[in-house]
Amino acid sequence: MIRLAAEPFEPGAELARFCAGRTETGAVASFVGIARAEGGQATALELQAYPGFTEIEIGRMADAATQRFCLADVLIVHRHGAIAPGEPIVMVACASAHRREAFQACDYLMDYLKSRAPFWKKELGPDGARWVEPTARDLEDIARWD
Amino acid sequence: MIRLAAEPFEPGAELARFCAGRTETGAVASFVGIARAEGGQATALELQAYPGFTEIEIGRMADAATQRFCLADVLIVHRHGAIAPGEPIVMVACASAHRREAFQACDYLMDYLKSRAPFWKKELGPDGARWVEPTARDLEDIARWD
Amino acid sequence: MRVLLFGRLGDLAGWRERPFDPPPATLAELKRRIAAEDATLGEALDGPGVQAAVDRALVRGEATLAGAAEVAFLPPMSGG
Amino acid sequence: MRVLLFGRLGDLAGWRERPFDPPPATLAELKRRIAAEDATLGEALDGPGVQAAVDRALVRGEATLAGAAEVAFLPPMSGG
C-alpha cells in the first residue's frame, strides 16, 4: 500500500493496522523518518510531490523490493506539503517470513526514497530556505544495492 | 526501556509512544516478531523467561547497542508465557540521528535476542511439543557482529 | 499543453505550472521557447540531474510531444 | 537454597524450582547431589550449551555457593 499524505499521519496506527491479522508472516520491519528541529535551525520542511507520478514510481520500487526480498506486504506512507519539526515524514513497513529480508527491504526502500523517489524537499530555517538534494552518503547508500 | 510482558502487547501503541515528542532524533527503525500459525502446525508457543535475570541481560545488550550505534533511545518489549498464533512475541525500536545506525542496531538486537537472550521457547503443535534452539541461520546471523 | 516545474526550478522561474499554447512539437522546441523567455530557467532545465516526464512517464534525451497534455521538469529528487 | 531449571531441563526433571537444604558448598557438589537422585538430569546439566547462574549472575566453570540463595541452570537460549 502506497499513500501520499497531505496531513500528519500517526506511525503507531499504521503499524497496528499493518500487523493486524498477520498469522503467517512473522517478521515486520519498519522505519519512521521524523522532521528534525536541528536545534532550532530548521523551522519547517516543505515537501513537494508530483501526485499521479510519485505514487506510481514508488509503487514500482515497492514491487521490485517485494520480488527481490520475498515480501508478503509493503506499506509506504509519505507526507507532502508543510511539515513541522517532530512530525513523521515517511514510514516504510515490510512483512516477510524471515527477519533479514524484512530489514533489508526496509533499508533498501528508505535508500531509494532518500535519493530517487519523486519528492523535492525545502528546508526553511531562520536564515531562509534551501532545497535539499541527496547527500554523498545517500548516494553511497543507494549504490550498495545496484 | 526493557519490558517483559506476560500479556499481549500492541506494537502500534508502543511505536506511537516511542515516536512521540521526538524532535531531534529523526530515524526510528523497529521490528516486530509475530507468532506464526505455520499453517496449523503451530498451535501455540510457550516462552519462559527468568524474571530478574532476563531483563538485566537484555538491558546489557541494549546498552552495548546504544554505545556501538550511537542510539538516542532503545525500546525492547518481549512476551513470555503462552502466546497464540498472530500475537506479537517481540518488538525492538531504535532511535538514532541517522537511519543506517537505527537499522543496524535493530538488526543486531534481534540477532542477539534470537540466539543469546535468556528465553526458552517451546512450540506446541498437533504432534506435541518441542523446545526450539537457535537455528544454524540464527548462529550465522549473530556471528556477523562479533 | 501544461508545463510543471518542481523543486528549485519552480522557485527559479517564479511559477510551478503554466499552459503552453500552441503546444510545442518536441521537448527541444519547448525548452527553446522557455529559454527565449527566461534564459536562466532555460539553462537550469539542461542542468545536471534534471529529468523530464511527458504525461507522467520519464523520457531520456529527445522526445516528441505530439498529443502530450503535460510535461514536467524534475530536478534531483530527495524524499524521506 | 533454591534451584531453578529452565527450558527442556525443567521438562526432563519434572520440576522447575526446588529447595536444596542443607545448601551445597559448591556448584560441583550441587550437581553431584542432583545426579545422585536423577542420573539423566545430572548428565543433561553437563550437556552442551548449558550454563549456570548463581544469584542471577552467569558463572563459568566451578563456583562456590557460600551464601548463594539461587542457582539456575540455563540450556541454550532463544527468544524473539
Image: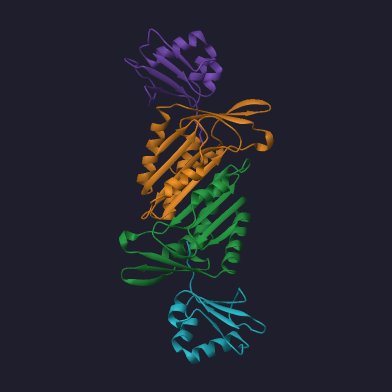
Chain colours: A orange, B green, C purple, D cyan
Residue located at (49% from left, 58% from top): B90
Q: In the image, is residue B43 above or below residue A116?
A: below
Residue C14 seen: yes
Residue B134 seen: no
Q: Position of residue B10 (x, y in %)?
A: 49, 53
Residue located at (37% from left, 41% from top): A64
Q: Position of residue A82 (x, y in %)?
A: 56, 29
Which sits in the foreground, C76 or C2? C2
Q: Quadrant of the C terminus of chain B?
A: bottom right
Q: Position of residue A91 (x, y in %)?
A: 49, 41
Q: Quadrant of the N terminus of chain B?
A: bottom right
Residue C14 placement, left or right of B124: right
Give the quarter of the image for residue C58: top left
Q: In the image, is residue A102 above or below residue D58?
A: above
Q: How many marks?
A: 0
Residue located at (39% from left, 43% from top): A65
Residue located at (54% from left, 46% from top): B16
Q: Position of residue B14 (x, y in %)?
A: 53, 51
Which sits in the foreground, B31 or A65? B31
Which sits in the foreground, B140 or A120? A120
Residue occupying the far front of the picture: B7
Q: In the image, is residue D5 above or below residue A45?
A: below
